[in-house]
Image (cartoon, helix red, strand yellow):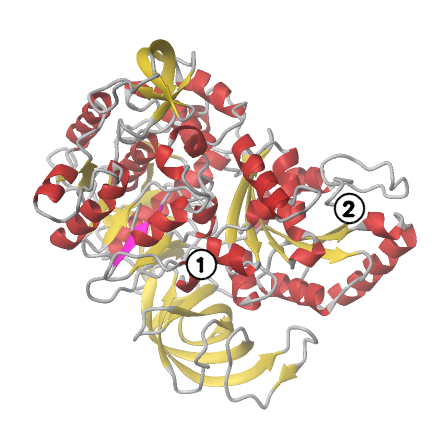
Amino acid sequence: MTQTHPDYQLSQLDQLEAESIHIFREVAAEFEKPVLMFSGGKDSIVMMRLAEKAFFPAKIPFPVLQVDTGLDFDEVLATRDNWVNRLGVRLIVASVDDAIKNGVVVDDGKTSRNRLQIGTLLNAIEEEGFTAAFGGGRRDEEKARAKERVYSHRDEFGQWDPKNQRPELWSLYNGRLHEGEHMRIFPISNWTELDVWHYIDREGIEIPSIYFAHERQVIKRDGMWLSLSDAVQPREGETVETKMVRFRTVGDKSQTGCVESEARTTAEIIDEIAIARVTERGATRGDDRFSEAAMEDRKKEGYF
Amino acid sequence: MSPEISPVAEKHEGRAPMDLLRFATAGSVDDGKSTLIGRLLLDSKSIFEDQLEAVESTSQSKGYDYTDLALLTDGLRSEREQGITIDVAYRYFATPTRKFIIADTPGHIQYTRNMVTGASTADLGLVLVDARHGLTEQSRRHAVLLSLLRVPHLVLAINKMDLVDWDEAVYEKIHNEFTAFATKLNIPDLEVIPISALQGDNVVTRSENTPWYHGPTLMHHLEHVHVASDRDLQDVRFPVQYVVRPKSDAYHDYRGYAGQVAGGVLKPGDEVIVLPSGMTSTIEGIDLFDQEISEAFPPMSVTVRLADDVDVSRGDMIARVNNAPKPSQDIDAMICWMTNEPLRPRQKLAIKHTTRTGRAMVKDIQYRLDVNSLHRDQDTRELGLNEIGRVQLRTTVPLLCDPYAKNRTTGSFILIDEATGVTVGAGMINSGA
């Protein structure tokens, strides 16, 4: 019989995978109604892959929830559908437009779609009675996330209290909840952006095509390249240019910028990131740039 | 299931498998801990331009004439406002050989609770001392906690050596003093490194100021310290997490026990015992996603199939017939208490050990350990916040446990307040009876 590891050593990627699978299984075993928050972005796709592996050959034992901002990239929705169909999981779509229509959130014309997602998401969690929601947050993304737990407790208003977090020791997660509370679960807390890319490369899994370099009509705004779309039209003084670009994160069209890139494969993206000098959020997420504490504020309110 | 046994390692095409090291740092800003972490992140190119720029502008607005690398690690605004760090923060950096996860624990508030949390998953503990002040009560406390949590490797970094003119005698004195103290502790591996975090000496690059020092730089040591033998590969311990039953046409009769290997090496054909029932069977196969693998070892997450139709559920443990933990309801453990309301005899709590959950009652508090002097206070009647003591518990369900010194996974548990749901205690088992 073949010996798998003559030295009984797991690569760091295998160790991260093992840890994440452990988390998925704990949640499935201990929570009544878990749900996986799926944005169609690379982090949530890695989560889908890990969930697939955790329960194979059984199906993933919980549904997938997507918040539809109404401004999602078509390529992202297509990838979402492919994943959901292949794995045979139930997809729940919570629409920001519906939430506005039903008065769940208020669109004052100034608030970004990303921010309106918070109310939409919390409402969906409450309506369906989900007790645990998996998110693709990573601690390397931003300073406020560095102190986030794997099991992140949310009160009945869906809020995070950074000063009152439960200590998290060994791999013993505490999933106790009171009525109306829920837990955010971050199974890829310990992954970095580069780990995610190495994993996508190794697993050969489908991600939205906008992550790879392609020609696109773009507009320079606030130092970012935004994609020309129904949501983003040139303002006075702005010109539309055609550039070879790719997206480092996927959010809504009005907020998510792209970077100039020639990287057409995951391997080329890995090379590009290895020498990148700006964090993915700093580069391409307008919503995180307003203040240093932007993320912390949104997290307290119940952001992913 | 594919009948072929395929090696897991083959999936890594072309890429050198990178190793993982988790380490915990402890100390206050005064020791230069945040500066050291900032230095490690900066010199390993894990800091991005926008992060560095943000820190530079904050440094300027505070009127500093240097870039305060410590600002890189001050996460939450509420902390920045107070100028203190209130919680364990996790940082990441990588070199071509290893990825590192730092559990950065603050020095002041909630000290013990945070340190214990950070150390619980660490392979290595990094203790910083200021060369001008030598060993302090705080550095001794760091070492005691790391030893109690059985962190197998310890680095004593003697920082600010530039402020003592790189004097070898200062290094030797602190080194000797620490070695003498460490004999009372469980520290299997110790490295003492003279550094200047601010200037970078012996952090990543070897310093010309320490010709008398022949050991490794801090980064070299972190990259090369041997952690593979820290795991227990002898004693098979497989806590069952989840039962996989697809009930689909293709896998109609499939029944697998999913879990993360906590000890030993499992192989198909092994005779095993299921605890606490004591039923025996044979491992029919081990699955990792859609592949059958020939062996599983810590910390792999796998699914084990047994040859016989025995009753196995979450909370059970698979072990070897001649090497299994004894199910025990009387637990003798060191407990670190983490909440304001003290732990008292007769108190009832929820307990989570491996994948098993039950209730526990405090039978007796034997002593409180003074983590500064190692004195055992036998007269204590309770354990307060951030105190550590030896406690006897009686549990409603038998725990399938090992001494923590033998296995950090099957030897640890947490205590949960049943009313608030909060984690209030961390336990390290001495023995079960």
Q: At 42% from the left edge and 52% from the top edge, which residue is drawn?
A: A148
Q: Count numbered badges in the picture.
A: 2
Q: Position of residue B401 (x, y in %)?
A: 44, 65
- On the same chain, marks 2 and 1? The answer is yes
Horizontal side, residue A75 vs residue B374: left or right:
left
In the image, B417: left or right of B375? left
Residue placed under numbered mark 2 in the picture: B195
* Along the line of sight, the residue nearer the viewer: A73 or A135: A73
Name the spot of residue B22 as percent of width and height, x first: 56, 47
B370 up-or-down from B248: above or below: below
| Helix, strand or loop under label 1 | loop
Question: What residue type is disc 1 on?
Answer: Asn
Q: Is residue B204 left or right of residue A215?
A: right
Residue type beneath disc 2: Ile
Magenta residues span A182-186
Per the model, the C-alpha gap separating discs 2 and 1 is 49 Å
Q: Disc number at residue A3? A: none
Residue B37 in view of the camera: no
Pointer 2: residues within 10 angstroms few (<14), some, or many (20+)?
many
Magenta residues, dominant SS class: strand
- Of residues A54 and A293, which is closer to you in this image? A293
- Residue under the point 20% across and 35% down: A69
Mark 2 or mark 1, earlier in chain: 2
Q: Residue at x 47, y 53 (%)?
A: B77
Is residue A87 among what the camera can see? yes
Give the chain letter at badge 1.
B
Q: Chain of mark 2?
A: B
Determine whether label 2 and label 1 are within 8 Å by CB: no
Dot 1, how many residues are within 10 Å of its Cα: few (below 14), some (14-19), or many (20+)?
A: few
Closer to the camera in the image, B10 or A46: A46
Which picture quadrant has residue B422? Answer: bottom left
Which residue position holds label 1? B322
